[in-house]
Image: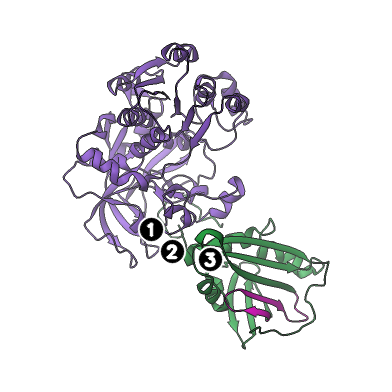
Chain colours: A green, B purple
Amino acid sequence: MEKTETLPPSVHSGEGIKIVRACTINQPAGALFQFWRQFENLPRIMHNLVSVTQTSALESHWVARRSRQKTIEWDAVIINERPGALIAWQTREGSEVAHAGSVRFERAPGNQGTEVTIAFEYSPSMPELAKLAPKLFGKKPGQQIEADLLRFKALMETGEIPTIEGQSAGANQHTEEK
Amino acid sequence: MKALCWHGKHHVEVEEVPDPKILNPGDVIVKITTTAICGSDLHLYDGCIPSMHKGDILGHEFMGDVVEVGRAVKRLKVGDRVVVPFTISCGRCFYCQNQLWSLCDNSNPNAAALELLNGFSSAGLFGYSHLYGGYAGGQAQYARVPFADYGPIKIESDLADEQVVFLSDIFPTGYMAAENCAIKSGQVVAIWGCGPVGQFAIRSAALLGAKKIIAIDHVPERMKMAEQGGAMVISSEDDVIDLLKQATGGRGPDACIDAVGMEAHGSFYDDVKQSLKLETDRPHALRQAINVCRKGGTISVPGVYAGFLDKVPFGAAFAKGITFKMGQTHVQRYLTPLLKLIDNGAIDPSFVITHRVPLADAAQAYATFAKKEDRCIKVVLKP
């Protein structure tokens, strides 16, 4: 059964910048969908998110980092959902970071698990989002989403995300950002 | 604890650093009993590998005793004596499950950065730059070992550290280089470079049934060690191509192993280009191998390359139908079979050791090894 809500588009046709990234994860689609649909889980893999809170069956409130001190917030609504296969959402009308996104889960050939495809579309005409886009999506479009996807894959396949944060080093080691 | 840290080109120091901690549930901490300096550490020492940070702990050939285990670890317990592969592998991705451990999808925390450079990321490595994960290495008193259920091999016999420590890298690396040649009985294998990997490639080629092994180097003590391993030796200062053709009845070797890699000596052209940063690697051995390998032969490359090569005769390789096999070693694949070879006496890897020094003297040992002084071939460090 499809759960949908009809909203005016947050990014008008033809004027959005679209980012699509895919990755194959050695796990069944159901388990991946379940993790993703629990939006509260996403800050574990998406390092720019501070928190996501489910506010109703279809609505959620997102808080992201825009700089070391400041955050930015928006509300999103699920506009299409097929359990085990697809989640699509868009921001509520009037958001200063209007965008739409979807994540698809499809069985990969040859028992290699599931192909996960994330798509984001945002409007470059919004000055606030134009400034924020490199932070949310990476300096090179998609770079940040790529890193998020790789963390998702590692967590789903191994139960942990590889890290060196907190390891030993000699003098003068500057902890560098990714 | 004490650890050897990288601070820049030709600048490493043993210093006091914090002890490692468990950071992920699959980690263990190993108290190191024996560690070593690898020829590939010299690429870091010479400043040829990008994305090194001041203070990085080097070292990827080590063994010791497990002193702490993460909560998800099932196969190891405190007190186990283990050798740790230099490749960090998750054991559960497509690549690990297909025995391609060094191509692991999940062990590199910096995978997205390496993807930008290489198209895809490969496994994280101990002490081998931040593009390969930035993991602290094992030239130290303790090391944190991630994904510990899928790497370390337990040593339950009374074999000495020096007999088994090289399971961590150079023995499997030399062995995979020889195995990649798909040696059939009666075949001739030529090996460029008689450093430690070359030495293990020579002995592995013999174990795999090569009829004749020809080794190429210019350092007398290395040439002598190659001869002791059963190789016929050619000086790289002579006309290598001519001599290899003579030694093979004009056919050229059936397989060629480049155990030299990106810092080959002997080409003025490459020295100039590399110092002007017009190329990153000096592929002199590789060019010779492509030229002299017999038609339809195989070139196996265990020597490390990191960037872009210039004047590689790809046309010759194409015209002769050469097969190339290369890459970081899938160490985990070889641990059990090679331990068996050591156990039954087919090989004693400690033959390669020329220097035994305390960890405290590691900085001096790097200099000695880099300059090939004091007949240095392989250094083991005692923490």
Residue A105 is tagged as none
Please tell me whether mark 1 or mark 2 is closer to you in this view. Answer: 2
Chain letter for mark 2: A
Residue pushed farthest left? B158
Q: Same chain, marks 3 and 2?
A: yes
Disc assigned to residue A152: 3
> Picture quarter containing residue A146?
bottom right
| Chain of residue at mark 1 | B
If the image is split into quadrants, where does the C terminus of chain B sit? top left
- Would residue A139 be found to the left or right of residue B362 on screen? right
In depth, the one of A9 and B379 nearer the eye is: A9
Q: Amino acid at mark 3?
A: Phe
Q: Is residue B356 visible?
A: yes
Tell me residue A26's x, y (percent): 49, 63
Q: Which residues are magenta?
A: A78-96
Label 3 SS? helix
Q: Residues within 10 Å of mark 2 (few under 14, many from 20)?
A: some
Q: Is residue B177 left or right of residue A29?
A: left
Q: Is residue B239 magenta?
A: no
The three-letter code of the residue at mark 1 reads Phe
Measure how far apart labels 3 and 2 are at the Cα level: 10 Å
